[in-house]
Amino acid sequence: SSGLHWEIVSCHEELGRLYERQKKLPEAIAIYQNILNWVLGINKGESHMAVSLYESLAELNSRLRNYNTSIGYLQEVLKINKKLYGEVSDFVIGDLVRLSSEYRKIKDSPREIEQMKSAIKLTKKKYGKQDVGLHRLYCMIGGSYIDQGEYDKAIKKLNKSLEIRLKEFGPQDQLVIDVYHLLAKAYKLKKDFYEAGKFHINCLKMKKLRTDDMMDSCDTIAEIYDKTGNYDNSQRWQKRAMQIATRIDRREMQSMLNGLEKDTAAHEHYDTNI
């Protein structure tokens, strides 16, 4: 025996949390690693406590940008949770999503997408193809496909996310706006400016729109007009974006949004203006 008792382990855990609060992350990592080594020695690591320690070590290393180390710990979490809860479980799905996010940080798109595909597959198997939770996974993998330059695949997944979000949250929800922006980005990179502009026009018709979303839509529409040689309209939308950037009073913002709605109403037949 290492001579450690659970009471001592509890004290060490509290010390680790104290180091975290003090933002002494390397010190916290050293404490958690020592506890983990002891846990591994008594039960081969297949325990809830080992999972908790692996997760803490993964999070702390990620905060220190040691992403490959973080991925290694998350892979251990995934293996243990498969044994504890089975292949098809919320814990395993969550592990796959976290792994996908870490792979994204090191720009490993193939592995990022692979983990997300597995998460989607297990979610469908556990909850069915119409599960509301799929909207987030479809959106995430859509963004991954955009980064990899696979725009048609991105659009397909994002449209699935949009369908669920419109049905479950309504057309004015911020989640819908987020998908509109990703779809616009995919179409813009695909050089389908008509479709890209259409999604930004949809955003500007929303009743509740964040300032940064308004600016992004105006800037993108200005860029689309510029690319198609319609420089007058490009300048007009650039000016609108600048107005948004310099006016933060809510009443003024609402007044400008009303003005934007008039602009969009004049562009219902968007294909004749782009």
Image: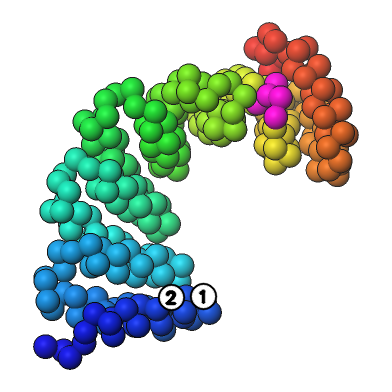
Disc 2 marks which amino acid? Arg
Q: CA distance from mark 1 to mark 2?
A: 6 Å
Q: Pinpoint residue 98: horizontal percent, then vertical percent.
A: 35, 52
Q: Main secondary structure of the magenta part?
A: loop
The image quarter containing residue 158 is: top left
Is-magenta flag for residue 207?
yes
Q: Residue at x 19, y 40 (%)?
A: 88
- Label annotation for residue 149: none
Label 1 sits on residue: 21
Circle 1/circle 2 CB separation < 8 Å: yes
Pick the residue in front: 215 or 210: 210
Disc 1 marks which amino acid? Arg
Q: Pinpoint residue 273: horizontal percent, then vertical percent.
A: 72, 14
* 79 over 176 or under it: above or below: below
Q: Residue at x 67, y 13 (%)?
A: 270
Q: Pinpoint residue 110: horizontal percent, then vertical percent.
A: 31, 46
> Is residue 198 toward the left or the right of residue 96 in the image?
right
Q: Which residues are magenta?
A: 203-208
* 162 over 86 or under it: above or below: above
The image quarter containing residue 194 is: top right
Pick the residue in front: 109 or 10: 10
Label 2 sits on residue: 17
The quadrant in which the C terminus is found is: top right
Q: How is the image coloured?
A: rainbow
Q: Residue at x 27, y 48 (%)?
A: 91
